[in-house]
Image: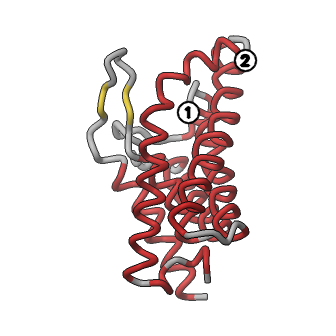
Amino acid sequence: MERNLTHIALFAALIAVLGLIPKIDLAAGVPITAQSLGIMLCGTVLGARRGALAVLLFLVLVAAGLPLLAGGRGGLGLFVSPTAGFLVGFPVAAFVAGLVVEKWRVQIGVSACAGAVVGGIVVLYLFGIAGMALTLGKTLPEASLLATPFLPGDLIKAVLAGLITQTIARMRPNAVLSRA
């Protein structure tokens, strides 16, 4: 139990630290942050349940007003902003990413990359696009177009999540709790 709590707190902190990495602007001016990589890693390394709990802990801290999101943002107001769908989708994305790694028993790097794509991109975008459509008064196709420029960066992060998870599994096999 104590080990689980430590891992959950550590990965919540990892998400916060990834928010400190300066954003990278794409040619179209779309910023890419590293925080969604943390969401992916929560699932691929900790597994479905622990990964979702780590993200929920992070979101509680954000809701409490701590400036932990990229750009130093925090507070309850973010949960009614255009990015609210992404925030709500964070724990579900981590859960799904972890579930893919737990259930799909192929090589860990492959299943972690697949989990990161399914959870950290597909599921997260479903929540995010729905949230943008609701808060901005857009149709789902219009909101989808707003999210499209983020896809290349998120695909890179999904590959990185697979490689990082695979490296952890090689160096410390017992540390990848999604496969424990």
x, y (%) of residue 141? 70, 14
Q: Which mark is residue 77?
A: 1
Q: Foreground mark, 2 or 1?
A: 2
Residue type at tag 1: Gly
CA gap between label 2 and label 1 equals: 23 Å
Decide: few, some or many residues near mark 1? Use Cα within 10 Å; few <14, some 14-19, many ≥20: few
Q: Nearer the viewer, residue 150 or 169?
A: 169
Q: Is residue 122 left or right of residue 36?
A: right
Which mark is on residue 30? Answer: none
Looking at the rendered structure, the secondary structure element under dot 1 is helix
Secondary structure category for the residue under label 2 = helix
Foreground of the two, 174 or 16: 174
Kindly identify the residue that appears in the image at 48 percent across and 71 percent down.
9
How does the figure colour the protein chain or chains? secondary structure
Which quarter of the figure is the C terminus placed in? bottom right
Q: Where in the figure is residue 107, as x and y percent of width and height?
A: 56, 69
Q: Is residue 126 above or below residue 4?
A: above
- Identify which residue, 75 or 167, lies in the foreground: 167
Residue toward you, 70 or 49? 49
Query: Where's the N terminus, which quadrant?
Result: bottom right
Q: Amino acid at mark 2?
A: Leu
Q: What residue is shown with label 2?
A: 140
Q: Is residue 174 above or below residue 41?
A: below
Residue drawn at (45%, 69%), measured in percent from left and top?
166
Q: Quadrant of residue 139?
A: top right
Residue 133: image location, x then y, percent:
69, 19
Q: Residue at position x 54%, y 34% from top?
A: 78
Residue lying at the far front in this picture: please name it: 106
Q: Residues within 10 Å of mark 2 (few under 14, many from 20)?
A: some
